[in-house]
Amino acid sequence: MFEQAFNNIDNSLWKDAGCDSELDYIEQTSWVLFLKYLDDLEKEKSDEAQLKGESYNYILDEEYRWESWAYPLNEEGELNHNAVLTGDDLIDFVNEKLFPYLKKFRQDHIDNPQTIEYKIGEIFSELKNKMHSGYVLRDVIDEVNKLPFLSAEDKHELSHLYETKIKNMGNAGRNGGQYYTPRPLIRAMIKVVDPKVGETIYDGAVGSAGFLCEAYDYMYERMEKTTENLQTLKESTFYGKEKKNLAYIIGIMNMILHGIEAPNIVHTNTLAEDIRNIQEKDRHNVILANPPFGGKERKEVQQNFDIKTSETAFLFLQHFIKSLKAGGRAAIVIKNTFLSNTDNASISLRKRLLESCNLHTILDMPGGTFLGAGVKTVVLFFEKGEPTKNIWYYQFRPERNLGKTNPLNDEDLAEFVELQKEKPETEQSWNLEIKDVPEDTFDLSPANPNTPEEGPLRSPQEILDEMEMLDVETRGIMQSVRELV
């Protein structure tokens, strides 16, 4: 039922002149899904209050509730065709009345930004209805109305399908890939970091909230299911920040589908925050992130950091180090050139990381890990408070070329997760003592001493992946230049 409903929604949106990509599909699906979810949530709370002999104050005025404008019912509990809006009447109501009404919640609840009321206002301040046809919107509403949100099983299936849409959006191009980190890689990172109930988890480049959602699933499966633990997990465990409008909305919706009613995600430019102002109350036990790379930040943004650089990912890394509690743990995806760049900022940042944190593990990933781009990345695993003494490298080199038809899977990284506990020397892993790192460059580029000297020539696919990576980098630089002009 769920999958068919999502397919039907996409087929309807494809016919609308205002929606022309997977990014538009998921954005428009998201706001309709959110309002149906809100309606189901309010009905559930109303029923609970009634059982206790109490009254329930609805968040939305009656005119703007789902059952009033989207799916009014007759006495038989069926769609009331005499009261239902469609065509131009539906579009006019949504654009001229519904969205302005919901947008006001942001200002009305500005003193309580972590409430669902504020999230309503923020979401509808950041997007607009792109559907031009009221008949298409009616079809979308009819499909969404079939979807139940309340049971854990329903939410699990819906969240899985929503993740699939995010993945498809990443494959579709138009910068969609920035919203999707392969979930097997995220899960491997979480297993190594092993977050516990009572700790806070943070992602300052939250995107579609993949790290936070996977961390939620990991912790939920392993914790004792008490009311206190559940409340802690849902209300005071997961925190994020996101700059982009669409990513923010997708992240909020993704977390809601995972059972977090009012996600602690702030819509802001993380890098606009002066890291010198980060205090203990702002710090977290665990940081999981894949910050955007290739972007070029303006001079005024760079002033917020001790090590000045225009590279977005390097600024994020400074933010993450500063945002970790003493003894806190982090797993950060970053482009592999971070390990060997010879510019002053890169050298200084490597020195800062090694001296203030224990960089105990580096996972070296091949090109093709991220669908749609041949960018080569590494994952940095570190703990804050003690300087690095030894780094364990693991070089993941699958026997197949990763790509859209052969994506990364959980089994691929199972060996890494298991070996990381003891950090042995194998053909794919080795240890590097910090005394062997050159003090003038702090070069950390992986040089596997356990690999036979006569390595195989690069395959044609690997060469194509590198060419694609260079193309992606060039496009990113040109886009950044255009934005600065």
Image: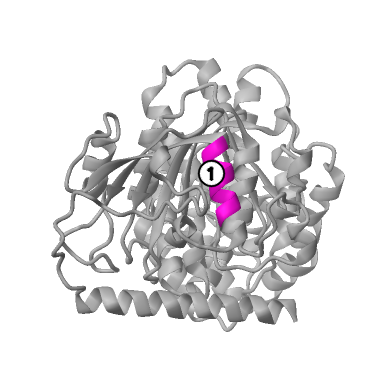
Question: What is the three-letter code of the residue carrying label 1?
Answer: Met
**Residue 354 magenta:** yes
Q: Residue at x 51, y 19 (%)?
A: 229
Above or below residue 52? Residue 73 is below
Which image quadrant is residue 415 in? top left
**Left or right of 315 in this view: 12:** left
Q: In which quadrant is the N terminus drawn?
A: bottom left
Q: Which residue is mark 1?
A: 255
Horizontal and vertical percent for residue 207? 56, 55
Q: Nearer the viewer, residue 167 or 371?
A: 371
Residue depicted at x 55% and y 16%: 228
**Residue 73 visible in the current orientation:** no
Number of other residues with Cα within 10 Å of mark 1, as a class: few under 14, some 14 to 19, many 20 or more: many
For residue 70, side relative to residue 342 (left or right): right
* Label 1 SS: helix
Q: Is residue 436 above or below residue 466?
A: above
- Kindly identify the residue that appears in the image at 56 percent across and 30 percent down: 234
Q: Which residues are magenta?
A: 347-355
Residue 469 occupies quadrant: bottom left
Q: Is residue 148 magenta?
A: no
Name the magenta segment's main secondary structure. helix
Q: Is residue 200 visible?
A: yes
